[in-house]
């Protein structure tokens, strides 16, 4: 019998992991209102590679913040259409893991960026 703690742990349960990643993705600015099969496969690939949900969340937040950091005079970017958009940042963080506390920093920074009108944010 499988212990309940492992069923509820996204690190050991692929369905929970995929659901957690897709929920994070949909909660970001400039992402679609729903996911598709390709997004689900991408999240499952990250699970199969053993990437922690924290690393994936860090990549999603970092990429979103980088998009928002573009100059106000730059032409607007199209909406993100796929979870695969974040793959290069995931690889960047696999190669160079972020320091302890960086995820919390990104969470706060994105919250501030979303709450602040574009052009009014200071970094």
Image (spheres, rainbow, N blue to C red):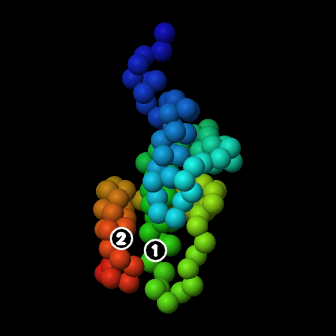
Q: How many marks?
A: 2
Q: Quick check: 48 left or right of 24?
A: right
Q: Residues within 10 Å of mark 1 (few under 14, many from 20)?
A: many
Task: Write the residue at 60% across / 54% down.
Answer: 83
Q: Secondary structure at mark 1?
A: helix
Q: Secondary structure at mark 2?
A: helix
In the picture as drawn, the residue positioned furthest to the front comes out as 33
Distance between mark 2 and mark 1 Cα atoms? 8 Å
Q: Nearer the viewer, residue 69 or 120?
A: 120
Measured from the top left, where is residue 43 in percent x and y? 59, 45
Q: Nearer the viewer, residue 83 or 95?
A: 83
Measured from the top left, where is residue 56 in percent x and y? 50, 51
In the picture as drawn, the residue positioned furthest to the right comes out as 38
Task: Write the residue at 48% across / 15% down.
Answer: 2
Measured from the top left, where is residue 110 in percent x and y? 37, 65
Task: Write the residue at 46% across / 50% down.
Answer: 24
Asked which quadrant contains residue 69, the reply is bottom left
User: What quarter of the picture does the C terminus occupy?
Assistant: bottom left
Asked which quadrant contains residue 4, the reply is top left
**Which residue is under mark 2?**
113
The answer to whether 31 is drawn above or below residue 76 in the figure is: above
Q: Residues within 10 Å of mark 2 (few under 14, many from 20)?
A: many
* Residue 87 appears in the figure: no
**N-terminal of the two: label 2 or label 1?**
1
**Which residue is under mark 1?**
68
Task: Write the residue at 54% across / 60% down.
Answer: 31
* Residue 18 appears in the figure: yes
In the picture as drawn, the residue positioned furthest to the bottom comes out as 73
Measured from the top left, where is residue 68 in percent x and y? 46, 74
Residues under numbered marks 2 and 1 in contact, where contact means CB atoms less than 8 Å apart: yes
The answer to whether 29 is drawn above or below residue 49 in the figure is: below
Residue 44 circle label: none
């Amino acid at each position: 019998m499988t212990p309940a703690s492992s069923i509820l742990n996204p690190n050991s349960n692929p369905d929970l992991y995929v659901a957690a990643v897709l929920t994070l993705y949909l909660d970001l600015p400039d992402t679609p209102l729903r996911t598709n099969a390709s997004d689900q496969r991408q999240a499952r690939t990250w699970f199969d590679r053993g990437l922690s949900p924290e690393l994936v969340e860090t990549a999603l937040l970092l990429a979103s913040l980088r998009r928002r950091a573009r100059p106000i005079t730059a032409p607007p970017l199209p909406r993100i259409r796929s979870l695969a958009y974040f793959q290069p940042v995931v690889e960047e963080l696999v190669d160079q893991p972020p320091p302890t506390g960086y995820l919390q920093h990104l969470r706060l920074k994105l919250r501030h960026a979303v709450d602040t009108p574009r052009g009014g944010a200071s970094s």
